[in-house]
Amino acid sequence: MANPPPQSFGLGKLAMTPVNVILLGVMMFLQFAVWGAWFVTLGVYLEKGLGFSGAWIGAIYGTMALGTIFSPMIVGAIADRYFNSEKLMGILHLVGGVLLLILPVVGTNPEAFYAIALLYALLYSPTLALANSITFSHVPNGTVWFPILRTFGTIGWVVVGLFVGFVLPSLIKLPEGTTVDATAYPLYLAGGLSILLGFFSFLLPATPPTGKAGEMLPAIKALGLLKDPSFAIFFGVSFVITIVLAFYYGFTGNYLADSILPKLPGDMRPDSVAPVMAIGQIAEMLILPFLGACLYFLGMKWVLAIGMFAWGLRYLLFAFGSGGEPAAIGPFLVIASLALHGICFDFFFAAGFIHVDNNAPKEVRASGQALFTFLTYGLGMWLGNTISGVIVDKYTLFNEVGGEAKITQAVDSFLKATNQDLKTDDKGVFLHDVANALGGTIASPITEEERKKRNIPVLAALGNADEAATRNPKLVDTLQKDLGKELGNRAARLLEESHAKALDPKHKAEGVFTTRNWFMVWIIPSLGVFAALAVFLALFREDKKKAQALEQAAV
């Protein structure tokens, strides 16, 4: 019997040197800290900081899914043949870190931001597979050690979220009324961490290439699994349900910042959504160790079903917790529902990978995992991010009231009722400001530079800078007449609030002022989840005997 490595933990054949445990643990910590530093707050920055539409926010989040689709080509064609995994990982993180640092500078318009974000995703996504490969290459037993080391990744995500929310705001000076989420600082933090991990990667244990070309499209080999009706149902439902799950990843941060955090008492209101959303990762980390026991007592079908149900339930809570004070569910319950992420993620994604591993024949097991990844983290997430952005825009107040034509009509009525005869340019600028306040876009007839020269205030037709924010009481009357009572009231509140902020940068909103109908944004994916769950329960059949036979054959 071979002696355990010197200075090991004394676990016999499972022993690892403390140096390797530390190196691999720090690698996992930084790998997910890089991701978590920007991923949670990006939507708020794109909306509040750069003024991007929901469609662009969804598309930019979708770049990570595209990275997942194409990363096997990079790893299979390069890492498996020519480069040590740790060196390739270091290069990818160094270049990716530079891209994150220049992203806020160069990506000032949606097209440029999307292009750089896509390039970054193509660099970052392969590092997830490389980190796993490096870990499995240097542990004596992946079943024992990988979950332990992977936990450091979740810890990294949580720690960086807490740092963004509680430490970063105290280190920088933000403009009055601006939160750290609406700035580029989380991206700069992620860029710095990525460069740090890039250099650190060269200290990792050497992981030479296998010398054989890896599979560039490994999922294709697993298509034969779809001949099995149960597998076909599993993959099909997983694909469909992931489309609606993408709503959570792309827009929960914006939802919390818009509709939930403003309801909290001032002394309990965090400056960032990052530490609030870290609740989900903490729950994920706490629940994962019990997944095996749940699979044993409940079976795979019901574990997957509970995971799907948790997604639908959380979306329902989001929907009924949206809006102002009359919301059916309070903000604390909505925030507590983030803990459902432990069940959502572990009982669906983690259990899904286990299901494929237990039921796919040994020769296509890895390809089956690749197919599940492609359909969920790849194609499903990409479609979901794209669709969610379109739906978020559809239920923005600007579009709900009828878009540019209806807004123009309402503005004409307001100007007529208040006896204001604006010049063409001044009216165009006012229309531009109104559209922005209601979550839409109408092009301004003049440039920002010209506007500054002419000193045209924001929403000038509502009152000059030395007057009250709601100079004209006829605002509500005209908006209700042209837009309807409910939508008119919402529009008036938003315009008054936007005008108040324009008059006083230190103005702090009291209550919820959101341009979006978050109820509809969340009820749609909730219904989608429950529909997919119903199909899954009706058609999926778990073949326990087949799984046991395959497990014995593998042994």
Image (cartoon, rainbow, N blue to C red):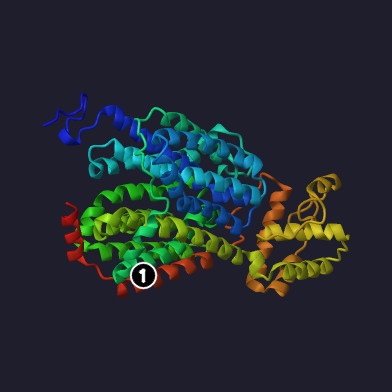
Which residue is more in the foreground, 31 or 125? 125
Q: Residue at x 83, y 60 (%)?
A: 427
Query: What is the residue that sits farthest to the top in this orientation?
Result: 6
Q: Is residue 405 above or below residue 383?
A: below
Q: Is residue 309 above or below residue 29?
A: below
Residue farthest to the left, as pictured: 1
297 above or below 288?
below
Q: Nearer the viewer, residue 49 or 34?
A: 34
Please tell me in which quadrant of the rendered image residue 361 appears.
bottom left
Q: Quadrant of residue 221?
A: bottom left
Tell me residue 263's x, y (percent): 52, 55
Q: Quadrant of the N terminus?
A: top left
At a point 73% along the width and 71% down the height, the residue shown is 406
Name the residue rendered at 14%, 30% in the picture: 2
Residue closest to the eye, 299 or 276 = 299
Residue 393 location (% of width, % of height): 60, 63
Query: What residue sits right under mark 1 in the picture?
Result: 533
**Left or right of 379 on screen, residue 545:** left
Q: Position of residue 320 (x, y in %)?
A: 47, 66
**Type of amino acid under label 1:** Leu
Does residue 153 appear to the left or right of 442 in the view shown?
Answer: left
Residue at image point 55% right, 32% down: 171
Give the farthest residue toward the front.
212
